[in-house]
Amino acid sequence: MPPTESAPVTSITRSQVLTGVLVVGAFVLIGAGFAAFNLCGGGDSLVFFGVAVAFLGAALFRTGAWATVIPIAIATLTLVGAGWYGATVAGCSL
């Protein structure tokens, strides 16, 4: 067979790596939230879920979904605030 040209090598840009890290970090935080479900009245769990939502929001923003910024910010603040309040009421300090 005669040699053929190979397909051009696509390089992974820095922004794609950072977006991948954000998505993987979100899944790790969701797992940590489920693991911490019984701690501090569920407050720690809500904080982990809130940070995971923020990570996913950052990944969406980096891919061009700018309209998701305000709803994701509201969801993040609600989850983190409720988690902090719940943990404080349960006697834990974050």
Image: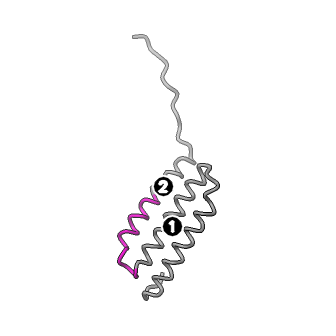
Mark 1, secondary structure of its residue: helix
Task: Point out the stretch of residues depicted in magenta.
Answer: 25-41
Q: Is residue 39 magenta?
A: yes
**In the image, 34: left or right of 25?**
left
Q: Identify whether 42 is placed above or below 13.
A: below
- Quarter-wise, where is residue 73 in the image? bottom right
How far apart are labels 2 and 1 at the CA level? 12 Å
**In the image, 5: left or right of 15?**
left
Residue 25's x, y, as percent?
Answer: 46, 59
- From the image, tell me which residue sits under label 2: 23
Mark 2, secondary structure of its residue: helix
Identify the mark nearer the N-term, 2 or 1: 2
- Quarter-wise, where is residue 37 in the image? bottom left
Circle 1: residue type: Val
- Quarter-wise, where is residue 38 in the image? bottom left
Q: Identify whether 12 is placed above or below 94.
A: above
Circle 2: residue type: Val
Q: Identify whether 8 is placed above or below 47.
A: above
Q: Identify whether 53 is placed above or below 82.
A: above
Label 1 CA crowd tier, 10 Å (few <14, some 14–19, many 20+) = many
Label 2 CA crowd tier, 10 Å (few <14, some 14–19, many 20+) = many
- Residue drawn at point x = 37 percent, y = 68 percent: 34
- Residue drawn at point x = 50 percent, y = 80 percent: 84
Q: Is residue 28 magenta?
A: yes
**In the image, 44: left or right of 10?**
left
- Residue drawn at point x = 51 percent, y = 67 percent: 51
Residue 17's x, y, as percent?
Answer: 52, 48
- Residue drawn at point x = 40 percent, y = 69 percent: 33
Which labelled disc corresponds to residue 51? Answer: 1
- Helix, strand or loop for the magenta stretch, by majority: helix
In the picture as drawn, the residue positioned furthest to the top comes out as 2
Residue 10's x, y, as percent?
Answer: 52, 34
